[in-house]
């Protein structure tokens, strides 16, 4: 299956469809892990997807790639490919934030964790490091470093929804990865947003007590 057909099957969900229940063709699932990983990375930088598909379709497709409730694609990042390939893929998650979350998560951040303004895209943005199968207990030190670097880079932006996503992830990792706490404390000293809801959320995350 060529990339364009794979991409179209990933995102072409009819209105009202549930990505957990949606079935794709056998050819979609027959793509090898190595090729599927290449397709995922290509999709993250493909400008055409933002023209071809609605925000709802994009959100459901991104949920399919990163939530194992929807597919086995998340395991590309933990077990299906070599460690070197996994690390490359993890570092490329910066493109997920830059090209999808920053672009499509536009709801105002006030009541963190309870907004439904951005639909499926907003859900996966906020919950990314909760639903994603990668965590310190199943990752090599190189994979952990790559993920931490992604979250650190996100904290250099001023996009509130993406900031909350990275803070959420760092908060969950704080109890096992000391660097996560250091990054949060450093950011709290010079936050990149004036939204006090986000700043207070980051302060709470330094304790590892995050929701």
Image (spheres, rainbow, N blue to C red):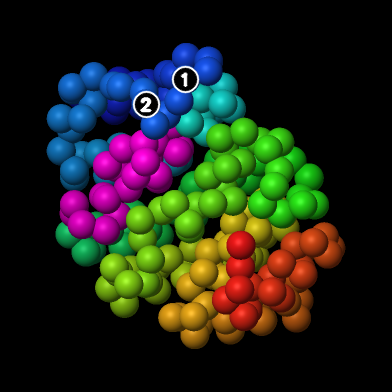
| Residue 180, horizontal then vertical, whole percent | 53, 77
The image quarter containing residue 202 is bottom right
Element marked by disc 2 = loop
Which disc number belongs to residue 21? 2
Extent of the magenta region: 61-81
- Inspect the magenta stretch and tell me whether residue 158 lies in it: no
| Residue 31, horizontal then vertical, whole percent | 18, 32
Q: Residue at x 71, y 43 (%)?
A: 115
Q: Residue at x 31, y 62 (%)?
A: 87
| Residue 152, horizontal then vertical, whole percent | 55, 69
Left or right, 71 with respect to 126, comes to left
Tell me the distance, in whole angstroms, between the alpha carbons under discs 1 and 2.
Answer: 8 Å
User: In the rendered view of the protein, which quadrant contains the N terminus?
Assistant: top left
| Residue 186, horizontal then vertical, whole percent | 67, 81
Left or right, 154 with respect to 149, comes to right
Element marked by disc 1 = loop
User: Is residue 38 visible to us here?
Assistant: no
Residue underneath mark 1: 17
The image quarter containing residue 30 is top left
In the rendered image of this protein, does residue 124 appear above or below residue 13? below
Q: Residue at x 80, y 61 (%)?
A: 197
In contact (CB < 8 Å): disc 1 and disc 2: yes
- Inspect the magenta stretch and tell me whether residue 62 lies in it: yes
């Amino acid at each position: 299956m060529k990339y364009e057909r794979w991409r179209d099957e990933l995102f072409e969900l009819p209105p009202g469809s549930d990505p957990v229940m949606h079935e794709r063709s056998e050819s979609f699932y027959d793509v090898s892990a190595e090729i599927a990983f290449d397709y995922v990375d290509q999709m993250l930088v493909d400008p055409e997807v933002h023209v071809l598909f609605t925000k709802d379709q994009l959100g459901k497709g991104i949920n399919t790639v990163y939530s194992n409730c929807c597919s086995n694609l998340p395991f590309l990042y933990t077990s299906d490919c070599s460690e070197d390939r996994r690390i490359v893929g993890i570092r490329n998650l910066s493109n997920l934030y830059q090209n999808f979350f920053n672009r499509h998560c536009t709801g105002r951040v006030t009541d963190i964790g309870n907004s439904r303004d951005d639909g499926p895209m907003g859900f996966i943005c906020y919950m990314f490091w909760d639903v994603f199968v990668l965590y310190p207990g199943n990752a090599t030190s190189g994979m952990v470093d790559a993920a931490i670097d992604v979250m650190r880079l996100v904290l250099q932006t001023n996009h509130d929804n993406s900031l909350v996503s990275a803070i959420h992830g760092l908060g969950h990792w704080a109890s096992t990865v000391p660097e996560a706490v250091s990054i949060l404390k450093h950011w709290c000293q010079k936050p990149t947003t004036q939204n006090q809801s986000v700043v207070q959320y980051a302060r709470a995350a330094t304790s590892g007590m995050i929701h």
